[in-house]
Structures are given as C-alpha cells and as structure tokens.
Amino acid sequence: MGKPGTNGWINNPGYEIFFDTIPAEVRVAFGGATVGQSRQARVMYELGHAPMYYLPLGDLDLSLLEATDHDTYCPYKGHASYWSINAGGKTAKNAVWTYADPHKEMAELKGYAGFYWGRMDGWYEDGEKISGPREIPGRIDTTTQFKVMFPALAAQWHPSRNVGISPYEFAATSGQVVWWQDDTGREWQQGIRDRVLEATALRGDGDAHPYG
C-alpha cells in the first residue's frame, strides 16, 4: 500500500478514515466455531476500500488463531501483522490482522483486529445472520474514486515522484497537486481536479437539471 515507513498523513492530511462503533453485538464464525463476539465491534470506512469490521482482541478466541510471518504496511495505519484461522478442519490463511503500533493519527486501532469479510463463513449482528457489512451512503463513495473513474489518467500517475501517495487515495474532485508522466516521458505537476477537467467532455443539454 505504500513505501514502508512513509506516513501518508504528512503528504495527504485530508485523507479520511472513519472507525465507527457498531450498535449491535457482532459475531464472526468460521469452521463451525465462533472466532469472535463483541459489543464493541467497529466498522472502518476508508476511501477505495469496502467497509471492514474490527473486533477487540480481548473478544477473540485466540486458540483458533495462528500467527504468521506475513506483514503489510499502510501509510495511513502502519504495519500490520497477521494470523491464520484454524477451525473445523479448515484454514483461512492470513485472514485476520492487527496494528500493534499504529500511526498516532489512527491510535484507536490499537487493540483491535480486522477481518477479511469474505473469508469467513458467517457474520451475525444481534444473533441475525447478515449478508454484508454496514454501509452509510455517502460516507465513503468508492464510485467517485479518481482511479476508478479515470483509469487512463491514473495510469499517468508518476511512478516515483508522488512519494507516499497513490491514485486510489483521492476523489476525482481533489485539488491535490501531484506529478504526472505521459507515454512520451513528459513530466509535469498538476492538480487532480484540473487534470480531470481537461479530460471531460462538454454536455449538449445546456442548463438541464433534475428538477424540471
């Protein structure tokens, strides 16, 4: 997710991550066992990511977890270490992670473990099985992510000059000034929104609006 050691908040202080308490008891099951159950579960909303559920480490059945040597780095959260889940003769490799020493901007992550939603057998809120994580419309709209809306422009994101930031981290309307490089090797700096406006087409319906 980024160069190890780079703190993304320095280069992109406007980046948004929400870590909200879920108003229900959350239980996650795998291999016929309850891996975790908590009334203090949280959901993370982050640009470019699906909502992720996190449970306190104290509410997990640690006997089902096996530490691995897998390690990843997020410039906004820090280094993550992983566990595999072994239950009922099944294994979900590197399916659970934690940030033992998160960046200070995300200090509230300490003591929580995140789960890959789709690798679990079932999720429950207040005893009822649910089909997907909670979503708040408009909270994190991945459809407006710059990389999704303008993949051709995202391909011109300079491969080395934009230290600590990536095209998935910004909305298409962001004013962030970054480095670009086209197929000819030309390099220049320009705001993301300005670059997008250059690539947009003129509408032919004048002053039409949805209210008639």
Image: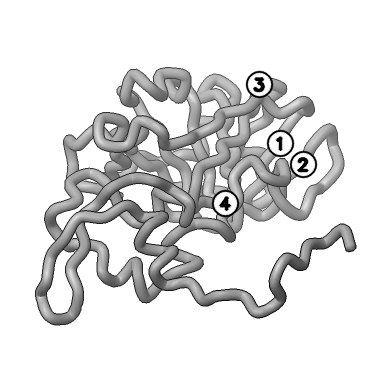
- Which residue lies under the disc numbered 4? 50
Alpha carbon separation for disc pair 3 and 1: 11 Å
**Is residue 81 at least partly visible in the picture?**
yes
Amino acid type at image mark 2: Tyr
The residue sitting at 35% across, 62% down in the picture is 195
- Which residue lies under the disc numbered 1? 27
Q: Left or right of 38: which side holds 117?
A: left
Alpha carbon separation for disc pair 2 and 1: 5 Å
- Which residue lies under the disc numbered 3? 40
Amino acid type at image mark 4: Ala
Query: Mark 2–mark 1 contact, CB under 8 Å?
Result: yes
On the image, the x and y values in percent for residue 70 come to 28, 48
- Which residue lies under the disc numbered 2? 124
Q: Earlier in the sequence, mark 1 or mark 4?
A: 1
Alpha carbon separation for disc pair 2 and 4: 18 Å
Q: Dot 3, how many residues are within 10 Å of its Cα: few (below 14), some (14-19), or many (20+)?
A: some
On the image, the x and y values in percent for residue 27 come to 71, 36
Residue 201 drawn above or below residue 118: below
